[in-house]
Image (cartoon, grey):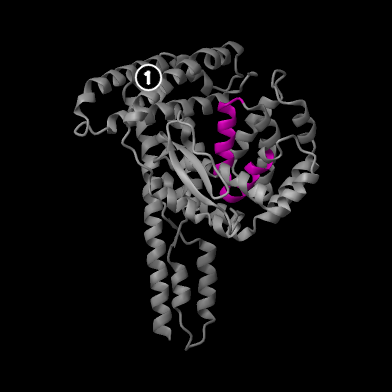
Amino acid sequence: MPQMNKTLLKRLLFELVEDLVRVEHQIETIDLTVQPSIKPYLSALQTQLEGTKADLFSQRNSLLALFDESPTEDNLADTLLQDVFPAIRKRTEALANAIDPLSQNTLAPEVELFMGNLHLNKLLPEAPTLVVLPSNGEAAPIPSSEDLIVEPLNIRSLETPLHWVGLLQQFSKFFCNKTLQLYALLEDMHLPEPKINYVAPLISLRLLGPAYYSYYVIQAILKDDGDALWGVEPVLFQGLNRFGIVNKDLVILHQAVERLRQQPHFTAPEETVQIFGKDDIKDELLRLVEKVIPERLAFTEKSFSRVSALQERLANGVLISAIPSLDNQAEQLREHLNQLDEEATIYPLLNQLGEAAATPREIINAGWMFKLDNAFHWLYSALITEQPIGWAVLKQNILELDINLLKSIETSEVHRVLSHQEAEQHMLVER
């Protein structure tokens, strides 16, 4: 792996900590009244987990060095990437494998609301049934077919909405293969094989927005995927700009990946480097995606404006189930009210003054933007605070974000249904 800059090292550290938090949460939430005989086993796992946390925080000085302004020292990056991070990840995965079979977690119903909100049946009317299957990462997944698409979801992600943006991978590939216009145009494009691996992420980006970009890039870094970081990431980021989605944290993440690509030891297939080193291929791919996914189904610049409003609410610790009315909208409504005839009904305009239900897609995007904006601050605070208080606060921040997003998705659905019923009642009254 090439020399990694501090921004990416901190992202890797946060993902490592998140995994550890979720394993600990799994252990703590197992109902011993159902299986009282496993209490000694859980106690042993908890002891191992405490030891893992202690070993991680024993590297406090090295980890704090990631937060100063000096360039990354070779020995620091090597120590973290070759020793500290792999050791902690290996122990976390061992704990996860031990606890997953005992997990009582079930698929959150909000997953179905999120997937339904994407209206994939409108994008591809003859699409097969899409099933989200809880997985511990070891069992062989049920193969997808013409009638069934299976998207595996890790057990620790069942109630983690930020991870759900990875649930379109199989659908996006199926869409590429089954959309004749897209398939025909891809055949004429000079792309590395398999071509679908470079186009499917753009389909997901168009449908899911910056949340998918963030998720994809972090997963590519975790897997040290040179193809993804060289061939796909630049097109995804260019897509964000093309679709009018601009955010400082997304820019910082992209610039960190750019610096990684400039490292002399960065490896990617030569064909990928040659093809994606040209801007015209990126523009061609993005135009193609815009053609096959209409704006009414896409995550757009307007969607991102709504997400930004939600992110501000999330920072205040409140639910983000509804979009606050924007000042410019209120001004436009005042103008419309002044122009109404005396006998005209005002109900449609008054309804616009109320808050509109946020969609699950918008809620999860707001969660990702909030995470990108706050993760480093949470890490730094945990490292400079006496333990176990630092860890407890960090854990609380991570889990409370999950809880807020889940509750917001649930509440937004209630809001949407009630708003629809209220609109129907007004229509009946007016008749």
Q: Quadrant of the N terminus?
A: top right
Identify the residue at horizontal 48%, vertical 19% (top origin): 63
**Of 133 and 144, the residue lying toward us:** 144
Determine the secondary structure under disc 1.
helix
Identify the residue at horizontal 75%, vertical 42% (top origin): 282
Q: Which residue is mark 1?
A: 53
Relative side of 251 to 94, left or right: right
Where is 266 relative to 329, above or below? above
Q: Position of residue 344 (x, y in %)?
A: 48, 85
Where is 423 relative to 109, above or below? below
**Of 354 and 300, the residue lying toward us:** 300
Identify the residue at horizontal 53%, vertical 21% (top origin): 66
Q: Quadrant of the C terminus?
A: bottom left
Crowding at label 1, few (<14), some or many (≥20) Cα neighbours within 10 Å?
Answer: some
Q: Is residue 208 magenta?
A: yes
Identify the residue at horizontal 48%, vertical 88% (top origin): 342
> Which amino acid type is marked by label 1?
Lys
Q: Main secondary structure of the magenta part?
A: helix
Magenta part of the chain: 198-224
